[in-house]
Amino acid sequence: MSLDDPVLSVAPQTEPTVAASGMPPRFNCFVTGTDTEIGKTLISSAMLHALVARGVRACGMKPVAAGTELGDDGKWHNDDCDRLAAAGNVHLLPSITTPFLLKEPAAPHIAAALEGVTISPVPILAAYVEINAASDAVVVEGVGGFRVPLNDEYDTADLAEQLALPVVLVVGLRLGCISHALLTVEAILSRGLKLVGWVANETQADMAFADENVLALEQRIPAPFLGRVPRLDQPNAEAAADYIDFTQLPNWPLQNAI
């Protein structure tokens, strides 16, 4: 699959506008991170929880997930996908919210090769259009960091560019996070994408100079700082949402009635 191959057109949604019908603009975003295992799912789930609390029909999407376990229901489950589904209130088939669910917990292009699967953008973009039609808000969570290969010619940055959604960055607070975060910001902006906010997530309870790292990032990331989530004893969407100010995001809904 080449990036020159035709794909479904997805209209960018970065500026707050009012629809001709007088309805408020919808909220959609793409959540990426500085690395894998840094809290993208926790923050995405918190965002969905906050949307649902405002009476919004919200659905999470993780287009590619690697690493599954066979559940008691006889179906393959990915923990990230299950947490997104639990946080939202629009429930669609897993094959729609995660078009590529891979068994091996490895880089997606490797896990896909083991199953004889080629990850391509067309099924992902088609699924996104279907989710978008069934909901008022969509939170799309990437896989791993911002530039994770999906096949030999296509990576998650390419996917984010095709979706053309505003981006929220999750920074895992650990040694090296400043460089990782700033390089990710450069990569996001170089694609012409709009970085609309970032969240600091404490991946460890005792990081040295955590405050100083957050301050350095605040001074250097050209986007609103949405909040800092501490290391939670029981990490869940509701608990994490208490530490994040999502109202700084463009098109964030005030209150709705389902």
Image (cartoon, rainbow, N blue to C red):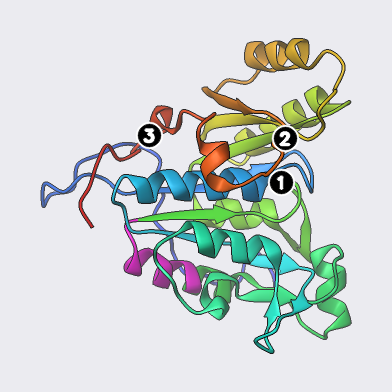
Say if residue 238 shows up in the picture.
yes
Q: Amino acid at mark 2?
A: Thr
Percent of width and height locating residue 80 = 67, 60
Percent of width and height locating residue 52 = 37, 51
In the displayed structure, does residue 133 sit left or right of residue 148?
left
Q: Amino acid at mark 1?
A: Phe
10 Å crowding of disc 1: few (<14), some (14-19), many (20+): many
Question: Which of the 4 quarters of the picture holds residue 206?
Answer: top right
Range drawn in magenta: 127-136
Q: Amino acid at mark 3?
A: Pro
Dominant SS in magenta? helix
Q: Gap in Å between the C-alphas at discs 2 and 3?
A: 21 Å
User: Secondary structure beneath disc 2?
Assistant: helix
**Residue tagged by mark 3?**
250
In the image, what residue occupies the spot 38% across and 34% down? 250
Say if residue 152 shows up in the picture.
no
Give the mark, 2 or 3, whose residue is nearer the N terminus: 2
Magenta stretch contains residue 131: yes
Query: Measured along the vertical axis of the image, is residue 133 above or below residue 73?
Result: above
Residue furthest out toward the bottom: 74
User: Secondary structure beneath disc 3?
Assistant: loop
**Residue tagged by mark 1?**
146
In the image, what residue occupies the spot 61% across and 58% down? 159
In the image, what residue occupies the spot 59% across and 52% down? 160
Marks 2/3 in contact by CB < 8 Å: the verdict is no
> Is residue 52 or residue 26 the one in the foreground?
52
Give the mark, 2 or 1, whose residue is nearer the N terminus: 1
**Residue tagged by mark 2?**
184
